[in-house]
Image (spheres, helix red, strand yellow):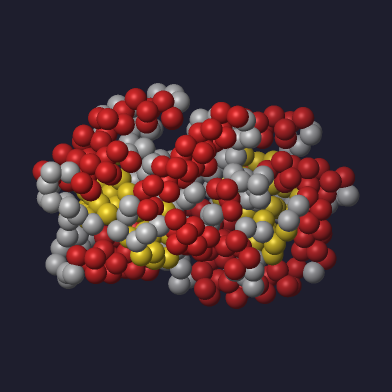
Amino acid sequence: MVAMRILLVPSSDYLGHPFPQRHNHIFEHLSYKDEVHVVRFKLYPRIMRDTHAIIHDLPGECKGNLGLYYALNIVRHTSEIRRIVHQESIDCLVLSNLSAPLGYRLVRYGSFRIIPVIFDLQDYYPSAAGFVAEPGSLINTFFTGALEIVQNSILQNSDYIVAASGALFYLAQQFGRGSVAYIPNGISEVFLNPPNVTITRDQLGIHDSDIVLGFVGSIEFWFDFETVVRAARALRERGIPVRVLLIGGSLRSGYLSFLKKMVKSFGLDEVFVFAGFVRQDLVPRYLSLMDLCLAPFRLTSMASYYAGPNKFWEYLSQSKPVLTSEIPDAIVNRKYLSLYRDYDGFVNSVLEFLREPDSFIQKAKIGSVVAKNMTWKRSANQYSQLLHSLLGS
């Protein structure tokens, strides 16, 4: 294959996001064979990771409201993206952000050569309105509608669309004019070869006799932890020694603060363990402490509905039973997962796990075989083949 120059406009801060995202995993792999350029939205003050890509810092810094940051800087961002494409002789543009639709159009129809545009649909982007205004509010509804118009416009004007989940694939087919490919999220190498590090329950104040319900990821509004809190109280009242271990934190909303207040008001301070974000290579060691892993997606959230959770595969790679809400990608993979719909379903599923864990464990064992093949390297190879095929290289 002939090396190509790729410009990625990512969904978030490529270097500053608290943990590596889809684009970090895929495009770091690509950078070993191709020249990968990435624009950086400076959303976080600290750089959290190294990179082999060529980074172009965009003007402006986010010091508060996310929507205000994008609105104030859209013209400067547009100009910079256009300059990079021209000056660096970029061969193809991968968009995964709604903040630069104007930049997209300028790059596409500017005065210099037209290049292929790929839209990486890794999330249902209009749900980002939840970072600007409380979900369910009139302001949130307005911003969601506006972002849907922008997203659909980009879908309709892209040469190729890459979807990260089955639900997003069908959305892209509905609104997009170009071809659509499904390239799923995956797991990193650390889940196949965890480091030789010991983390014990005792270090976190958890007893060996406790039943640990665990979660790894962003503690944000598209998850329904309220049901988890209510269920934990009900299970404790039945005399079941459940503990809830949450690995991760909030990104930009106030949901984590809301959750901690709810936990306190329910008198469950000793039940919930908020461990915060941890190094990704240590995640498998934290998973080893969990009896039942959770993916409590909020069924009323479009972000949840369209999600392609790599946490399913991360959990399963460690042969851990998974309890998840009935989102489309969970239903498709239900042979490896245990699904619930509401509070009663959650409680009954935990009780069933305690009575007859074998069916849960068997699903996890079957799923672990599949999970170990769902790697980011595999997804990156699919991406590479797609990009090179578009350029005929």
Q: Nearer the viewer, residue 251 or 287?
A: 251
Residue 225 placement (x, y as % from top left): 68, 43
x, y (%) of residue 171? 49, 57
The answer to whether residue 260 is visible is yes
Q: Nearer the viewer, residue 283 or 373?
A: 373
The answer to which image quadrant residue 35 occupies is bottom left
Location of residue 328 (image quadrant): bottom right
Measuring 27% from the left and 54% from the top, which residue is drawn there? 117
Q: Is residue 374 left or right of residue 325?
A: left
Which of 269/175 is in front?
175
Residue sitting at x 27%, y 43%: 105
Figure check: 228 above or below 91: above
Rendered residue at 45%/72% (across/down): 373
Q: Check the image and report above or below for 135 versus 340.
A: above
Give left or right: position of 232 versus 185.
right
Residue 377: x and y in percent read: 36, 65
Residue at 19%, 54% in the rendered image: 115
Image quarter in which the C terminus is found: bottom left
